[in-house]
Image: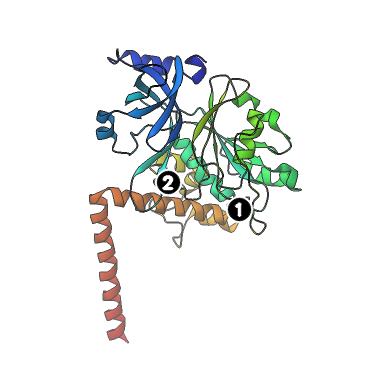
Amino acid sequence: MSITGWGWNSYFETFWQQGNRKSTVPARVVRQQREFWRVAGDFLECWASASGKLRLAADGGADWPAVGDWVAAEVHGKNTTAVIQEVLARRSKFVRKSPGKKVEEQVIAANVDTALLLSALDGDFNPRRVERYLAQCWESGARPVIVLNKADACDQAREKAAEMQRIAAGTAVCVVSARTGQGFGELEEFLCPGHTVVLLGSSGVGKSTMANRLLGQTVQDVQAVRDGDSRGRHTTTTRELFVLPGGALLMDTPGLREMQLWDADSGVAQVFGDIDLLAAKCRFGDCCHEAEPGCAVRAALSTGRLDPSRVENRRKLLREREFLRRKMDPQARKEEKQRIKEVHRQQRWRYRHDKFAG
């Protein structure tokens, strides 16, 4: 397959021409296994390792090659390992905080055109989780599409789709069954030749079944979900880029149970734009929407215009974003410590005042 079939276009060509890369050729990362990458382009597909210069510069963080990346690689011939010298500027990237305590950005998917956000219509139906994925998608630069899977196992698919539409913020919502093929015609407009699509969603929503249906063959193992809560087990263990029969490129990712936000300010604002518009009408500019008079958000909650769980989810994501900001920014940590000390000082003053007043 030619380089254009792997998604090369004028954006990457322009960037390539701006540098001096005579000893290298453009290649796309189509698979990753630990510190080796499978690359493809206008040459025989092969494995590649990172150059010493790249290892020093990237240090395993966000600049480390990820599936979907375009890289400058030295290709030495058949049955030899190529060397990745540089990761080209990404047109889009889907990132999260690395799992665990380490504060580091992790790229899940790079240069994605459309992100199919899978949510199951069974017992694991969760609009709040989709809001989290939407925030990351809007931040990434990829176009999100909400895909409600397992329509064959749900009698209220239409009602649940309407519920998802209310939080979709203009995003397309498709109802499908990866097991039977129901509704797959709705996905065709997103599967153009050379167009990169990523499947995102927690374990058990049917990503592997979806990938197998789109590819027309079994490439991913499928396991049954638990009866109690419809949650699944991780079946996809590597990130990989597949070529669909029509020429689109499909990226499958491991199930994500820990989906912490990373630098998603504009994404959160996009998802909760309706709440932000209401907040602009509050009497006080710094309204926390809790007990302040003249709060437009609380007024909408009292009339049923806003879903309380949606408002609480927004608060949760904003708190998570602020927590990460403090961990990364020493000045922000200092300011937060000062704020907490001031709160404690005021509490001690109130305690002494109330004690002597009594």
Q: Is residue 284 visible?
A: no
Q: Which mark is residue 34?
A: none
Observer-side mark, 1 or 2, equals: 1
- Give the spatial CA distance, label 1 vs label 2: 22 Å
Total marks shown come to 2
For this orientation, the residue located farthest to the bottom is 358
- Taking the spot 54% from the left edge, 23% from the top edge, the residue there is 195
Q: Which mark is residue 231?
A: 1
Tag 1, which secondary structure?
A: loop
Image coordinates of residue 322 in percent, x first then y, are 36, 51
Which of marks 2 and 1 precedes in the sequence?
Answer: 1
Q: Is residue 345 visible?
A: yes
Estimate how packed mark 1 is, as few (under 14), some (14 to 19) or many (20 or more) residues with alpha carbons within 10 Å. Answer: some
In the rendered image, which quarter is residue 186 located in? top right
- Taking the spot 37% from the left edge, 36% from the top edge, the residue there is 35
Image coordinates of residue 160 in percent, x first then y, are 68, 46
Of the 4 image quadrants, the one containing the C terminus is bottom left
Tag 2, which secondary structure?
A: loop
Which residue bears the numbered disc 2?
261
Give the answer, above or below, for where 208 lies relative to 90: below
Image coordinates of residue 242 in percent, x first then y, are 55, 28
Residue type highlighted by circle 1: Arg
